[in-house]
Amino acid sequence: MADTMHDDQSAGHPVRVRRIYDEPGSDDGLRILVDRVWPRGVRKETAAIDEWVKDVAPSTELRQWYGHVPEKFSQFEARYREELATSGPRAALDHLRALATKSTVTLLTATKDTEHSQAAVLATLLQKTH
């Protein structure tokens, strides 16, 4: 699956979304895992990530409700944005915003459908802030 780039002309640095299982790209910049649970089959010692920001991931309850059913994505996005407004996730999102102002950021997820993932929601939010 190709990486997804959420990019606009006013942004200083692109924000990309890729699967953690894909080979790292030379233009990935900071590679940040945004899943709450460590991905299966990936060894922490050899994972090509710069940070694991699990506090920005959706709650277990929201993730289980969504179940990666594309028809639920708009509801998932709205509920996820509400979660991101609470203190812990908001601090993690602010951290990602700070990183995205300084460098290209690639948000990594184990999800097969990156277009309908929390990483896609985060990428959209990050692009709007810089």
Image (cartoon, rainbow, N blue to C red):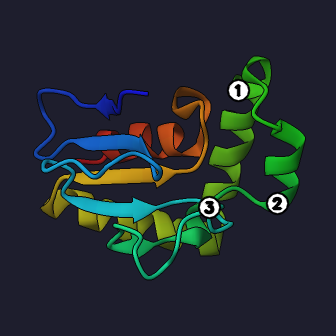
**Viewer-nearest residue: 99 or 51:** 51
**Which x, y percent locates residue 84?**
61, 57
Camera-side residue of 7 and 87: 7
Horizontal side, residue 51 vs residue 37: left or right? left
User: Can you tell which quarter of the image residue 9 is in?
Assistant: top left
Tell me the element at label 2: helix
Spot occupied by residue 62 in the image (x, y as percentages of width and height): 82, 49
In this picture, residue 45 sits left or right of residue 60: left
Q: Are marks 2 and 3 in contact (CB under 8 Å)?
A: no
Residue at image mark 1 = 73
Location of mark 3 (residue): 39
- How many angstroms separate mark 2 from mark 3 (CA)? 15 Å
Which residue type does callout 3 highlight? Answer: Pro
**Residue that appears at 40% across and 52% down:** 107
Tell me, yes or no, whether the two marked residues, 3 and 1, touch with CB atoms within 8 Å: no
On the picture, is 79 further left or further right than 36?
Answer: right
Q: From the image, tell me which residue sits under label 2.
A: 60
Closest to the camera, between mark 3 and mark 1, is: 3
Q: Residue at x 28, y 44 (%)?
A: 15
Rendered image quadrant of residue 78: top right
